[in-house]
Amino acid sequence: MPNILLVGNGAREHAMAEAIARSARHPRLFSFMKANNPGIASLSEKIRLGGYADLAAITGFAREQKIDFAVIGPEDPLNHGVVDALAQIGIPAVGPNQSLARLETSKAFTRHLLDKYNIPGNPRFQVFTSPEGMKDFLNALDAVVLKPDGLTGGKGVLVQGDHFATKDEALALCEQILKDSGSVIVEEKFDGEEFSLQCLCDGKTVAGTPLVQDHKRRFDGDQGPNTGGMGSYSLPDHSLPFLKPSDIEEGLDITRRVAAALLAETGNPYKGVMYGGFIATKNGARLLEYNARFGDPEAMNILPLLKTDFVDVCRHIIDGTLDRLEIAFDAKATVCRYVVPKGYGLPADHVDAAAKARIEVGDVGDARLYYSSVDKRDDGLYLSASRAVGIVGIADTLAAARRIAEAGVRAVKGPVAYRADIGTDALIQKRIDHMKKIRNE
């Protein structure tokens, strides 16, 4: 009966808590959260509330509860060095240390790493800490993507054609990003379709999980501003219909080479999740970015399908023996749809009206429900300004999973919204047609 510490309070962590709770090892779960997630709390023996930068509070809680190992959910505590702090008191963790977490926390670090170790997948890019040479590089590329170097909650990337039109606008945005964050990465824009490849890594072995496609745009038809993710889907064959097998192999190969490069660069093995955001192009898979943890919402697509005991997976990651464990997933389809406040993703004056309103969660039927940013009070559940509830349908076919998810989201009442097109045939066909066009098929 291991004592396990979970750090995090979102829907991703609710899915992680559920995976821990169903272990045959009968673990005792203790959770450190910055806000009280009622789903995680219901699965935990004890919770502690506090900020993720308060390492003394996290390690103190871990010591009090005689924790055997920790599992870190979000990027924020990784960025603050929670794994290093736990290691100092003899508690191992599933999650990279602060130096290795630069895979996510510094986009420039990752681009330079691929460049230094001759790993394929990079775009043409340059990192600028001053405006010098910026205009010439922008003009040398057909279309560009602009990225601040640090964490942006999945919302900081600016894409030509979506967020701005001209190179003059790009230059002005670059100068603003420089002013705000000190550096900006300018990259060539890829044409293709994105896919999420979440891999488990013990420092040497990299094991892939079912592919997922996330939908960041706020509104149906991939319209509106970027968000942290409005939902996602996966298919029973664990692939996606617009991909070739070679795209998946290239994504796995890049991730394996990056794991080896991180060991060579830092001297420390990467233990945790390496989540590659890839894009399939006419020339194969290319890397958009890495995250140093499970995706949110993508964790909700894959963790409920995991047949291998999740606590065993965690132990093998920590022990560096992932090659000795068979990791298996159910051959089922999943559709995740996020229920959000009506103003989510829009300017603050739109958010205020729905944020902090009360919601009612009725019978979601066969769907799985994962709480995200909600405030549980004595008289019910209240919204925050962020995503509220992840609803997941799981079934033998995508159509059946979609129906389950649709029934589930309709059970949430209040000033809320969701994307109705995630996992629909029409949206997927649009992606298939796009890839056929750019591949001249």
Image (cartoon, rainbow, N blue to C red):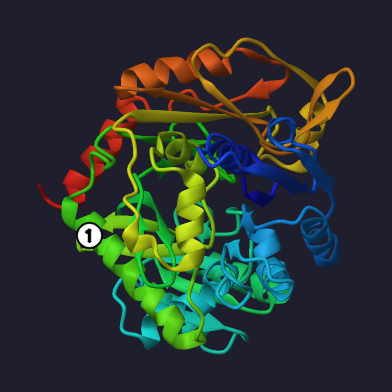
Q: Is residue 381 visible?
A: yes
x and y percentages locating residue 208 in the rendered image: 34, 54
**Camera-nearest residue between 155 and 270:** 270
Q: Name which residue lies at 80% across and 43% down.
A: 47
Q: Crowdedness of circle 1 by 10 Å Cα count: few (<14), some, many (20+)?
A: some
Q: Is residue 190 visible?
A: no
**Camera-nearest residue between 17 and 113:** 17
The residue to which callout 1 is attached is 249
x and y percentages locating residue 104 in the rendered image: 55, 67
Circle count: 1
Q: Name which residue lies at 68% across and 27% down.
A: 342
x and y percentages locating residue 407 in the rendered image: 51, 12
Determine whether 381 is above or below 439 in the image: above
Using the rendered view, name the quadrant where residue 418 is placed.
top right
Determine whether 283 is above or below 44 in the image: below
Per the image, label 1 sits on a secondary structure element best described as helix
Residue positioned most to the front? 1
Instruction: Tell me the amino acid under the disc marked 1.
Output: Glu
Give the quarter of the figure containing the N terminus. top right
